[in-house]
Image: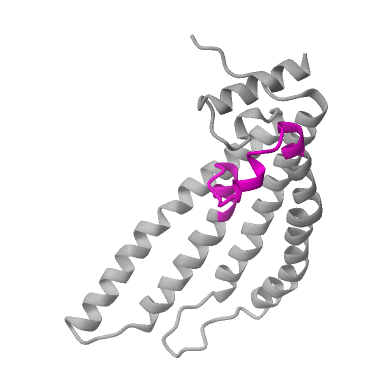
Amino acid sequence: MQRDDEDKLSAAIEAGDLPHHDTDALRDNAFSRAIDRIVGLVGEAFSWLWLVLLAVIIGNVILRYVFSQGMIELEELQWYLYAAAWLVGLSYTFISDGHVRVDVVHDRLSLRSRMVLEFLGLTLLFLPFVCFVLYYTFPFVELSWQTNETSTSANGLPARWLIKGCLLFSFVLLALVGLARLLRVVATLRYGPMPPAKEA
């Protein structure tokens, strides 16, 4: 039965009915769905920062080149917004499978082989790297919080710990989405792929 489901899924992918990525083949679970919902909501909220960033950049350009007045606060706000949106966007991109993949070899493998590679990538590369960053980020953010770190510029923005905290927050989200993906991969290896959705 498991082999039949895998054959049907492979046939559907070859026919162009499914994307080449394995998201639709992965077995789902309550934890992974909950993480996807949380990260999706956070990602959508933070995606509005790109519009705010655009408005700040335009305002800064107008002030500088039309009124010949530059503002350090706006310049720092630009990189605050960019850093926050980009960092939190990492986990949102991961759950939507929007990150870059090298599919030259990947597409030629069976679904089970792809799942084994995914398992190895998550357990040996992705999750250890995320844990490594978290381990060294926590004291970095903690020190900034305790000292109430501010900008080194005279007119710069206060609360630099806030933007440094985004690094910690984003990697906590990455750890959660990596764990959710790992659980899906393990379930798929154990129980086989999700059968293709039936047409209504």
Q: Is residue 135 left or right of residue 16?
A: right
Q: Quadrant of residue 37?
A: top right
Residue pictured at 61% horizontal, 78% vertical:
148
Q: Is residue 35 magenta?
A: no
Query: Magenta segment, which residues?
Result: 90-115
Q: Is residue 46 above or below residue 4?
A: below
- Residue 82 position within the rendered picture, expressed as x and y whole percent measured from the top left: 46, 66
Where residue 28 sits, quadrant-wise, is: top right
How far across and how far down the image is residue 127, in percent?
76, 54
Asked whether 153 or 193 is in front, the reply is 193
Above or below: residue 192 compared with residue 121: above
Q: Position of residue 141 (x, y in %)?
A: 67, 71
Q: Is residue 92 magenta?
A: yes
- Image point 59% across, 63% down: which residue? 166
Task: Answer left or right for 117 relative to 75.
Answer: right
Count of numbered circles on the image: 0
The coloring applied to the image is: one colour
Residue placed furthest toward the top = 200
Looking at the image, the residue that sits furthest to the left is 66
Q: Which residue is at the front of the view, 36 or 14? A: 14
At x 57% / y 36%, what residue is drawn?
Answer: 20
Quadrant housing the N terminus: top right
Nearer to the camera, 22 or 103: 103
The residue located at (54%, 33%) in the rendering is 19
Q: Is residue 164 left or right of residue 116?
A: left
In terms of depth relative to the viewer, which is nearer, 100 or 12?
Answer: 12
